[in-house]
Image (spheres, rainbow, N blue to C red):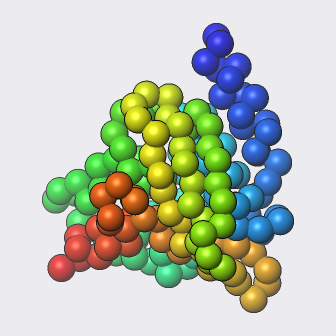
Amino acid sequence: MRKRLSILVFAMLVGRAVAGDGGPIDTVKALAALDAIEDQVRIFDATPTPLMRKYFSASFNQVWTTAMKHNKDFPVFDADPLTGTQGGGGIKSLSAEMAGPNRVVATMQLQHGPDQTIEFRMLHTPTGEWLINDIVYVRRGESLREVLGRADR
């Protein structure tokens, strides 16, 4: 019960931010709030979900779609795409700061497992929205876009 309450409070605090409102940090926090709910919200699927189209750039979604065509043959990416981990149980809390004009660096405390530092490379659209264009797993020095690109080779 306590876990669900903390997740609900976290989601309420950062859930007010939506893609495009405020800036790139707001976009990252809004998506992280959805990940905190664990299995109750499906962010990622074999084809871009409405949430993927809302928070990710069209070019990222295209790379995702191309890679997922191979998912039936082997797991293209076998982890939570936002945290780069397996069994993390969702994001418990997040702090984020701008690390450049189009880069948000977030430190995520997970429900289970060590904290993760993730860099979100952002795209500012002509309509003023901030969308995620890539996710870099700092500890591994690897981006999700690179991993997805290897699946199509």
Residue 64 on image: x %, y %: 40, 69
Q: Which of 142 and 150 is in front in this view?
A: 142
Image position of 55 (left or right of 69):
right
Taking the spot 23% from the left edge, 54% from the top edge, the residue there is: 75
* Quadrant housing residue 63: bottom left
List x then y, in percent, for residue 150: 23, 73
Q: Residue at x 66, y 60 (%)?
A: 97
Seen in the picture, residue 146 relative to 116 is either above or below; the reply is below
Q: Can residue 148 be seen in this view?
A: no
Q: Is residue 13 left or right of residue 66?
A: right
Query: Is residue 95 among what the camera can see?
Result: yes
Position of the N terminus, as image quadrant, is top right
**Quick check: 63 left or right of 25?**
left
The location of residue 62, given as percent across then percent down, is 45, 77
For the C terminus, the quadrant is bottom left
In the image, residue 39 sits, relative to residue 68, either above or below, namely above
User: Where residue 70 sits in the image (x, y, percent)?
Assistant: 23, 66
The quarter of the picture where residue 100 lies is: bottom right
Tell me which residue sits at (26%, 60%) in the image.
Answer: 76
Image point (70%, 19%), residue name: 5
The number of discs equals 0
Instruction: Please state which of residues 72 and 86 is positioned toward the viewer in this rendering.
Output: 86
Work out which residue is located at the far bottom of the displayed protein and give it: 126
